[in-house]
Image (spheres, helix red, strand yellow):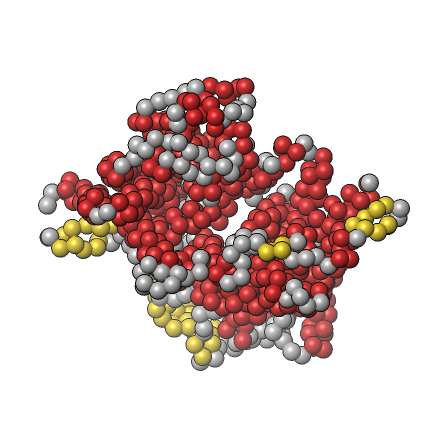
Amino acid sequence: MMLSVDDIHVHYGASVHAVQGLSLQVGEGELVSVIGQNGAGKSTVLKAVMGVVPTASGRITFDGVEVGASGFSSVKQRMSYVPESRGIFAGLTVGENLRLGAIVRKDRKLVEADIERELERFPVLRRYWDRGASLLSGGEQQQLAIARALMLRPRLLVLDEPTLGLAPIVVDLIFDVVEQLRAEGMTILLVEQNAVRALEVADRSYVVQAPGRVLGEGTATELAAQPDVVDHLGFTPEGRVQP
Amino acid sequence: MTVLSTRLQTPLLLIGITAVVLAVGTAGGPTLERVATLSLISVVFVVGLSTFSGNSGVMSFGHVAFMAVGAYTTAYLTIPVPLKGVLFANLPESLRWLAEVHTSASAAVLLSCAMAAVAGLVTAPVVARLSGLQSGIATLAFLLVVYNVLNSWTDVTRGSSSMIGLPRSTTIVTAFVAAALAIAVGWAYRTSRSGLQLQAGREDYWAAQAAGIAVGRHRAIAWVLSATICGLAGSLYASFLTTFNVNAFFLSATFAFVVMIVLGGYLSLSGAVLGAIGVSVLQELLRRLQDGGLTGGSALPPGTANLLLALVLLLTLVKAPYGVMGARELVLVRGGRRLRRGAQAVRTPAGS
Amino acid sequence: MIMEFLISAVGLGALYALLTLGVALMFGVLGLMNFAYGEILLAGAFAMYLFRNEPWFVGAGMALVFAVAVALLSERLAFHPLRDADPVILMIASFAVSLALQSIARMTVLPRARGIAPEPFLSRRIEVLGADVSVLDLVTVGLCGVTLVAVAWLMGRTSLGIQLRAAAEDFRMAALLGVRPNLVIPAAFVIVGVLAGIGSVVLAARQGSVSADMGLQPMLIGVVGAVLGGMSSLKGAALGGFLLGAVTALLETFLPTDLIAFRDAFLFTALIVVLVVRPQGLLSGAKVRVS
């Protein structure tokens, strides 16, 4: 397994025990989604993976190496993170935001090529290249955040609620991009509140229930066979249409 | 022990400690008595500051302004009228009455507290709205405004010239009584409904708000109460020294009080009292070290005492940012002096 | 007359923008409201005094060296161990650093104010576009202007600048992208040291003296300018500082003398009002919320 999260616990302060013994695995080239209701602890798991919040116990390994507690070590392991807040720098231009995604890379020529590739993928970014990022709409900021994350040439892309609060047409666009990246062989860990779409697009999914426990895991078909998962979701999962 | 006496242990212990200061000051010579009296006045001030900062978790750099309000009020009310005619020859027409008014020493103390409370009331709406660093900057700005007015409104405040000729009405005993009173009031507020709700807001602002606690309103209440206590400290200070200068109420005084409250632990009332006494003693020792009186050697260059004080504060911040006491209070358990953890664990208040 | 006033107003504005930028940079990158900023400036002025008998460029160069050295030392010794501390704890710590540095200055050569004879050419006046202008004002405009342009270039056009701006806005996100704290924090202190060093050269020339407490006023100016302009954006802060300087020059020329004494009271009252009503600053647009 490329990413292995093993029985982690996360606390916020003394009173909130947000994640209680959660485990999940992501294999190379896999698209894994984590779904569940608000407050189930989904985002907290991602933050723990990225070293943004410390774990009280348990292990997180990437390629067999324990993930460090600082943001910088995740960059070294080539993990890219698109947080729920998107983390766009409003005081920087679109172009500067994009370049910041490759700040640790030394291969300048390839960086320029990658910029070109992302501008092909997200044409709106080319149009606004020299504008302040604060002028972008929510959907455009989300595209910028994903493009910036891809500038690292990540081995694992971690997406936290990428479609939250976006217009339906932009939601479609984001899911198209996610599918396209999967087809390119990118390994992706996706947290989504839109369970139907997430189950459709993912190879495997984890259904998480408050406080941060896994209720069920598997492909959409496997999950459909688990009565308490179906009960919790309120619908029967249907997976991608296999070609 | 009964529940009641357990709850009263901390204030009684703290008053006991100030009584020791009183005893030492009375038994020693005039120098020691002076140091003891000033440290008791510092206790009054720091307990006042702690009534706000300790309960709200919001640091204030502006409380010295309330001390100034108390000191100037006492000066206007107690300097003999004939002398005032000389000191304030150029009073503007509308404030002419200031030169005529005169009260007893005790009335002056009460009115000084009242004036500080009014200053607190005027500024309370600001404090109720701000937290963290913004509050730190705003309270400092408040001090700068008061200092600027006192320093520049020469006709009324004598500007940078000293206030002189106050009758000496503060003795070591009145300073002790005031310290004990401040501790009692500070503790009563801390354990009151408003104080407890404010502490809940300190631990987790949004959770407290969500639970229906108007953190801002309780912050304002604590602010006005603490302003009143600091006004008392200012009044005592003025009528102890009988002469004072506007520069006594500026940054170096603020710094000295901040050292006291941080060293002791600004979340705890015991920390405030211990910090005020401890740092007063430390300051006196450093002063004597600087003068060469302690080592019998030659005097060290001026500034040495302040440098050492600053280093002590830095070391405290790095090693124990919540001071000696953290959020704990002094209590007696089965005859031995022990420390009991406060109701809640020490956590960064209103922080990241 | 108008030309003369304009140059002196622009000069004061540029100087204040310089001071404000230093305060805002440290606040942005570290969450540090640095009271010791004034003493970094003092270190520069101190060097000017020490090297007062050397040619002026030696004194000015040493002012930069001293200011940068003190800025880096304060970071290493005091702020580095407190890197994860609450901003208020940091502010108290900077209070302590400020007092410590001031005390050291008092203990060594500045127990009281010392005069520095200004370079003779600074006190001359020359004719510019038909107006009689003091060389000191022109030098202030030139030096501060060049510095501001250089900072603008560094911040806008270099990779370090982009990283600093990103870190100033959202330190955690910047770190997640690979911006190194151990690069940007010392870099910020070096830039602040340079800004303070140049500020000290200008101030020492304008005041003709140095003293242990000379850092207080410039530090407060920086704080006011930064809060007015908006702490989170360096551009806003610099603009806030510039306007503050220009308005100060205006007030000093046109306000009746007995009200000038209360300038600080007005200024800090305005500061409190801005903090309550518009904490993002007067000049920055509505802060973008992307969550």
Residue A224 seen anywhere in this rendered image of the structure: no
Q: Position of residue C125 (x, y in %)?
A: 81, 51
Query: Which residue appears at 38% of the width and 73% of the height?
Result: A59
Question: Is residue B167 toward the left or the right of residue C101 in the image?
Answer: left
Is A194 in front, or is B140? B140
Query: Which residue appears at 24% of the width and 54% of the height?
Result: B341
Residue A107 seen anywhere in this rendered image of the structure: yes
Q: Position of residue B119 (x, y in %)?
A: 44, 32
Query: Which residue appears at 82% of the width and 40% of the height?
Result: C1
Report the quarter where the C terminus of chain B lies: bottom left
Q: Position of residue A76 (x, y in %)?
A: 54, 76
Question: Is residue A193 toward the left or the right of residue B224 in the image?
Answer: right
Q: Position of residue A152 (x, y in %)?
A: 61, 72
Q: Spot the residue most to the right.
A: C130
Vertical placement of residue C76 versus B70, above or below: below
Query: Which residue appears at 47% of the width and 79% of the height?
Result: A63
Report the quarter where the N terminus of chain B lies: top left
- Snapshot quadrant of residue A48: bottom left
Vertical placement of residue C211 versus B14, above or below: below
